[in-house]
Image: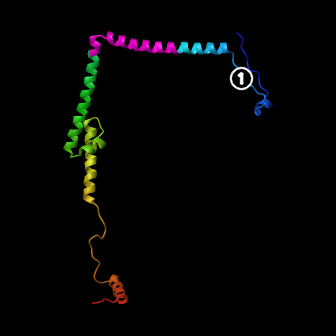
Amino acid sequence: MSNITPETPDPADSQQPQEGDEPKVFDEAHVKKLRAEAAKYRTEAKANAEAAAELAKIKEANKTEAEKNAEALAAAQRDAENAKAEALRFRIASKFQVSDEDADLFLTGTDEETLTKQAERLTERAEERKKNGNQVPREGTNPPAGGQDSDMREFARGLFPQRT
């Protein structure tokens, strides 16, 4: 097999392509060898993936009944803990009259003490907001009859006589 190795180019020649430059040519035998090797690796990778899937099936089949029951028990315990925490959260929310949306958003604790503190603080904030309310200063009040405003009104009335 004859390998053709590219010559080391002269830096002055590589800056400007010349008309006489020929593209690099690789030995066909070497290219065929590389392609065959790549195909071999691809088939080995596919075989390994299939073997891994088969091994996982065999491991699942070989699990003892006790292992399967232990996994099911652990899953059931997780579900029970989640349900217990959810029930506690909604019990605290109803006790403090927190809406469902606010409970989902603000009541994030996992124990009763934390949930109670969160609900109390949320309720206090809502009460403060209701107590203060939306307040607009001087809304609904009439200006006094006398004073500086009445002088300006008289001046304006003098400029624009009223028609009767």
Q: Residue at x 28, y 70 (%)?
A: 139
Task: Give how far across and how far down residue 28 sits, in percent.
Answer: 67, 15
Majority SS type along the magenta span: helix
Residue 10, quarter of the rendered image: top right
Quadrant where the N terminus sits is top right
Residue 123 included in the magenta stretch of the image: no
The residue indicated by pointer 1 is: 24
Relative placement, left or right, of 96 versus 157 is left
Task: Give how far across and how far down residue 35 sits, in percent.
Answer: 59, 15
Relative placement, left or right, of 57 versus 65 is right
Q: Residue at x 34, y 87 (%)?
A: 157
In the rendered view, would you say 86 is above or below 162? above
Which residue in the rendered view is the most extreme toward the front?
Answer: 19
Crowdedness near tag 1: few (<14), some (14–19) or many (≥20) residues, C-alpha within 10 Å: few
What kind of colouring is applied to the model shown?
A: rainbow
Q: Nearer the viewer, residue 84 or 26?
A: 26
Q: Residue at x 47, y 12 (%)?
A: 47
Label 1: which secondary element: loop
Task: Give how far across and how far down residue 13 sits, in percent.
Answer: 79, 30
The three-letter amino acid code for the residue at tag 1 is: Lys
Q: Nearer the viewer, residue 110 or 45?
A: 45
Residue 43 included in the magenta stretch of the image: yes
**Magenta stretch, residue numbers:** 42-68
In the rendered view, would you say 159 is above or below 104? below
Q: Residue at x 32, y 11 (%)?
A: 61
Residue 136, quarter of the rendered image: bottom left
Residue 63, quarter of the rendered image: top left
